Amino acid sequence: MDNDKDRKAQEEADELESKMEDREDARLETERDEEEDLNQGMQTGTHDASHPGIKWGPSYKVKKAAANRGTSATEKDSDKKG
């Protein structure tokens, strides 16, 4: 009689553990998909409809002389101002 109760309790515990693993797998897959979508949107600039992308202005362009020294044009311009 005790063996039947122990066996049934073990089966229920195994079933519960299996369900918990399935839920965890589903949760992780959902999180992974959301992160993948966000990363892809960040790379393409389409992660948010209200922010369609970055419009880089001319002040962010690197001048050839600055590129050779490893400084950006904005760093060079800010040095002149201050």
Image (cartoon, rainbow, N blue to C red):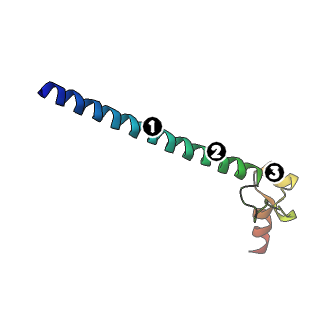
Q: Secondary structure at mark 2?
A: helix
User: Which residue is located at x 45 percent, y 37 percent?
Assistant: 22
Q: Residues within 10 Å of mark 1 (few under 14, many from 20)?
A: few
Q: Position of residue 68 (x, y in %)?
A: 81, 48
Question: Which is nearer the eye, 56 or 40?
Answer: 40
Counting other residues with Cα less than 10 Å from the Cα at mark 3, is it few (<14), some (14-19), or many (20 or more)? few
**Depth check, front residue: 60 or 65:** 60
Which kind of residue does numbered mark 2 sit on?
Answer: Glu
Left or right of 79 in this view: 8 = left
Q: Which mark is residue 36?
A: 2
Q: CA distance from mark 1 to mark 2?
A: 21 Å
Query: From the viewer's perspective, is the residue at label 3 or at label 1 nearer?
Result: 1
Q: Is residue 51 left or right of residue 25?
A: right
Instruction: Give the mark nearest the N terminus, 3 or 1.
Output: 1
Q: Quadrant of the N terminus?
A: top left
Which percent across, then down, holds residue 5?
17, 31
Circle 1 — which element?
helix
Q: CA distance from mark 3 to mark 1?
A: 53 Å
> In the image shown, does 60 or 41 lie closer to the viewer?
41
- Coordinates of residue 52 in the picture (x, y in percent): 79, 60
Q: Disc 3 marks which residue?
A: 67
Q: State the separation of the CA atoms marked 2 and 3.
A: 33 Å
> Could you say whether the residue bearing mark 3 is in a helix, strand or loop?
helix
Going by the numbered disc 3, the residue's amino acid type is Ala
Residue indicated by mark 1 = 22
